[in-house]
Amino acid sequence: MKNAVITIYVNKNIKSHPYLELLYGELMSRHSTLTVSHMELGLHGMIKILKTKGKIILHLHWIETFRKQNRLNFIIIIFYLSCILIFLRFIRRVKIITTLHNIVPHEIKYITLEHLLFKLILTLSNSIIVHSKIAKLISTKLYDVAIKKINVIPHGNFIKQYPNKTSMVQARERLGITQNRFVILFFGYIRRYKGLEIILDFLKKFDKLPEIIKKEILFLFAGCFREKEFLHSLLKLRDLKGLPIVIYDKFVDNNYVQYFMNSCNIGLIPYESITTPGSLLLFMSFKKPVIISRHLNILELANEKFCIFLREYSGDELSLAIQKAYFWWKLGRLEEMGNHSYNEALKYDWKIISEEHFKLFTEKS
């Protein structure tokens, strides 16, 4: 029925991630018959589902978070999840949809168990959502799931998520950054797969840069450091060699994202692997060009109008990209690139993306 109530249960707190806030906020604002609620896959959650009337959707996100550090507990959770999902899909007739944000986990400990976990959840899902065409092809081959049940729905932008009322001058004053600096920003949770290895390699050879660049460049790292060893290495390089590095080792509140974004000239995304374009779309939403690794997953979104691509994963290649970015900054090209990035970000509107989700939620399995 057209006006039937649809209840969506999500395995994550809606307020825990901007992606969830934007998606479900847009869905609920456009469809009054739809309700969204967080639910843990435990006894309490099962009772909640049994009491729910009407159509029920279980929407799973970031399924790698079901993993356990202990091998035995990992095996138990796989068995437990298989029982829960089989009951929900085939007995309770709940429609299970999984958004595969990461095709494989960023950090892998038990490769066989992690592959089994992903394959199990994807096999028992009615539908799967990925963010790019290449992710669809990789997923179907890697997990042997039917390609017809994998749907490509792009990641949305962050234009409405964060305040953006401050200028570059104001942002730099707030952060204590000199106005004439060429600022490169590394933003977000700082984890090993995000290119920390080549950043350190580049910084260790910092003295080889032309003198004019060394005088004006500044590296800004903002976000929680998951890799404390990397943080200590940065501090050592900064303190012993006097490198121009500013570190903000904290979670960045929504209201403060604008100060870091608007203080920089260009973003840095030298990730070893990229399966979701969230970080890129964040910079694009603030009119920023980026230095970024050339991965197939982001080439449907990224192009040379606003990206400086790393042709290989190395500190030397990163050095060349940074020097190119510096000279383009001097020529005034980075602002133009930023405008291109924002115009591209506008295409990834949550109104369109939420409607694609709603269509998937309401179609017959």
Image (cartoon, rainbow, N blue to C red):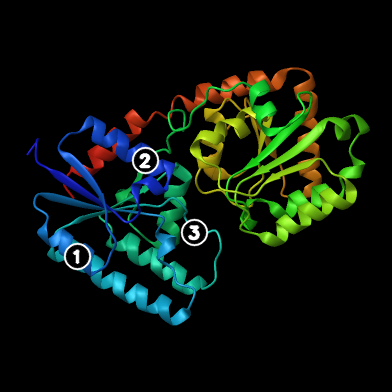
Whichever of callouts 2 and 3 sits on the residue coming sooner in the sequence is 2
Q: Please report contact status of discs 3 and 1: CB closer than 8 Å, yes or no.
A: no
Residue 210: percent from the left, percent from the top? 91, 34
Separation of residues labelled 2 and 3 (CA atoms): 24 Å
Residue type, numbered disc 2:
Glu
Amino acid type at circle 1 is Met
Q: Tell whether 85 sits left or right of 70.
A: left
Q: Which residue is mark 2?
A: 21
Query: Badge 3: few (under 14), some or many (20 or more) residues near its Cα, within 10 Å?
Result: some
Under circle 2, the secondary element is helix
Image quarter (top left, top right, bottom left or bottom right) of the N terminus: top left
**Residue 155 position by quadrant:** top left
**Closer to viewer: mark 3 or mark 1:** 1
Which circle's residue, 3 or 1, is located before the other in the chain? 1
Disc 1 target residue: 46
The relative height of residue 363 versus residue 213 in the rendered view (above or below) is below
Give the Cα distance between marks 3 and 1.
Answer: 28 Å
Q: Nearer the viewer, residue 364 or 110?
A: 110
Looking at marks 1 and 2 on the same chain, the residue that comes earlier in the sequence is marked by 2
Does residue 146 lie above or below 80 as drawn?
Answer: above
Mark 2 against mark 3, which lies toward the viewer? 2
Labels 1 & 2 near each other (Cβ < 8 A): no
Q: Residues within 10 Å of mark 1 (few under 14, many from 20)?
A: some
State the separation of the CA atoms marked 1 and 2.
Answer: 24 Å
The structure residue drawn at horizontal position 91% and vertical position 43%, both measured from the top left corner, is 207
SS for callout 3: loop
- Residue 301 visible within the image: no
Q: Which residue is mark 3?
A: 104
Q: Secondary structure at mark 1?
A: helix
